[in-house]
Amino acid sequence: VVKGMEVNAAFLITGVLLPFREAESFKEQGNAYYAKKDYNEAYNYYTKAIDTCPNNASYYGNRAATLMMLGRFREALGDAQQSVRLDDSFVRGHLREGKCHLSLGNAMAASRCFQRVLELDHKNTQAQQELKNASTVLEYEKIAEVDFEKRDFRKVVFCMDRALEFAPACHRFKILKAECLALLGRYPEAQSVASDILRMDSTNADALYVRGLCLYYEDCIEKAVQFFIQALRMAPDHEKACLACRNAKALKAKKEDGNKAFKEGNYKLAYELYTEALGIDPNNIKTNAKLYCNRGTVNSKLRKLEEAIDDCTNAVKLDETYIKAYLRRAQCYMDTEQYEDAVRDYEKVYQTEKTKEHKQLLKNAQVELKKSKRKDYYKILGVDKNASEDEIKKAYRKRALMHHPDRHSGASAEVQKEEEKKFKEVGEAFTILSDPKKKARYDSGQDLEEDGLNMGDFDANNIFKAFFGGPGGFSFEGRWKCPSISFEMYVNHLTGQLSLPEEMCCLRRVFDFST
C-alpha cells in the first residue's frame, strides 16, 4: 500500500503538477509581454501554455485577448469560444467572445454573449455598455438597409461608418460602404476599401464585385468584366456581379456599334444605338456622359442643334469635368448665335486646360459676342455676310426706297418716325458695307469709332442723294414723271411687292439705277 501511494504521488508530481507549473510559467511570461504591448511574443507564450496544458480556460482567454489586440478577431473568437466551453462560468471568456462577434459585425451573437455575462454577474458594467453598443449596431444596420432601398447612399455610408466604430473587422459593413461610395461616384475611396479586404482575403467575392464596379463606373469596362467574372468564380450565385457583368457587356457592345455607325456616316442609326445604350444602366455616370456627348455630336451632324445642346448639357450634368462636352456645346451655341453661352463654356474649358487652341476659341467667341451686340448691318440690308458689292448695292436700293420718308409722308406720325429710323439704319449699313476697309473692321469685330466714323452725326439723305444722283432738296414726289403709274406703285415694284411690265417703268429714264 505504501509503495502504491508513493507511485501515485510521483505520478501526480511528474504528470500533472510539473506540466501545470511549466504552463503557468509560460502564461506569466506571456502576461509580461502583453503588458509591454509586445503582442506577438505574448501570443507565442500563451500558445506554449496551451500546448503544455490544453484544458485551461484562462490560457485560451488570454490568447484570445492577444489576438484581439493584433486585430485577428476571427482567430480570437475561436479561442474565446473554447475558453467558455471549458468553463461556462468564465465571465471574461464570454465578454471576449461577445466583443469578437461585435467586431466581426455579428451584433445578435454578441448580444447573447453579453446577456450571459449579466446572468453570471448582473452588475458587470462592461457587459451593460457592450450590450448597448450591440443594440446601436443593429439599429444602424436596419436604417442602412432601408436607405439602400431608397437609394440614399450617403446615409448608408454614414450608418456604416458609425457601425464600423463598434465593428472594425466587419467585411460586410465595409463592402456595403464601398458599394455605396462607388454608386456615389467616390471611386478612389471605394477602391481603397475593397483593396484592403482583398489583401486579407483575395477570394472575397463581394470585394471583387466592388472592385469591378468601380472600374465599370470609371468606363474601364473590359477590366471591370474581368473582376465580375472572377467574383462569379468565387460565388457563382452572386446576383449583383452577374447583373453588373451583363450590363457591362451590353453597354460596351451598344457603344461600339454606335461609334461604328457614326464613322460610317449613318447618323440616324448611331442616334438610335446611343439612345439604347443610355437606357441600359442609369447609374453608370461616366459612360452615360460620353454617350450623351456622342449623341450630341450626332445631333449636330443632323443639324438638330438645340437637341445637341440638350445632350451636351446632360453630359456635363453627369460629369462636370467633361471638357469634350463643353467644347461640343459651345460650338452648337456659336452655330445658333447664342454667343454669351458659348463664351461661358469656352471660359470653363480654358480655365481647366489653358491651351493655345482653347484660348483662340474663347477669343473668337468673345469677338462674335461683341459683334452680336452691335447693329447687324447685313440683317438691316437683308443680305448674307458673304454678299458681293453688287448684292449690297441692290439691297440698299431696295431698302432705301422702301423706307424713304417721302414714301410715308401720308402715314401717321408714329409710322413716319419708325420708317425714318429704318431709313437711317439702311444708310448706315450701306456706308459701312460698301467701304472695304470699314467692312473689314466691322466683320472682325473692331470698333468703327476708331476710324473716326460717328454714326450719331450720320445723314442718311446725303447717302441716298449720292447713290441716286439727286440734287439738293431731293424729293421722289417732286421728280416723278410717269403718267402711267403712281410713285407708290413703282416703289412697290422696285421692292418686289408689285410686278409691273418693263415698258411702264419710265422712271428708269429719270434716274440712272445702273449703280
Image (cartoon, helix red, strand yellow):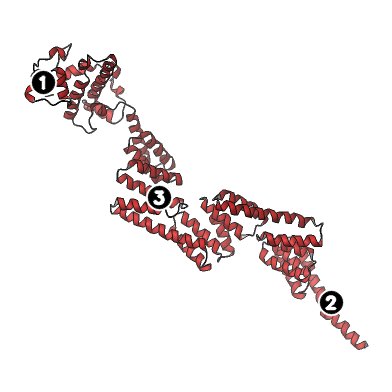
Mark 2 secondary-structure assignment:
helix
Height in image: 26 above or below 353?
Answer: below
Say which amino acid is labelled 3. Answer: Lys
Determine which residue is flagged by label 3: 290
**208 displayed left or right of 338:** right
Mark 3 secondary-structure assignment:
helix
Say which amino acid is labelled 2. Answer: Leu
Compare residues 304 and 391 and report the one nearer the observer.
304
Determine which residue is flagged by label 2: 17
Determine which residue is flagged by label 1: 512
Q: Indicate the quadrant containing the N terminus: top left, top right, bottom left or bottom right.
A: bottom right
First in sequence: mark 2 vs mark 3: 2
Cα separation between marks 1 and 3:
62 Å
* 10 Å crowding of disc 2: few (<14), some (14-19), many (20+): few
Residue at 38 percent of width and 51 percent of height: 275
Compare residues 104 and 481 and report the one nearer the observer.
481
Height in image: 352 above or below 495?
Answer: below
Residue 113's x, y, as percent? 74, 62
* 10 Å crowding of disc 3: few (<14), some (14-19), many (20+): many
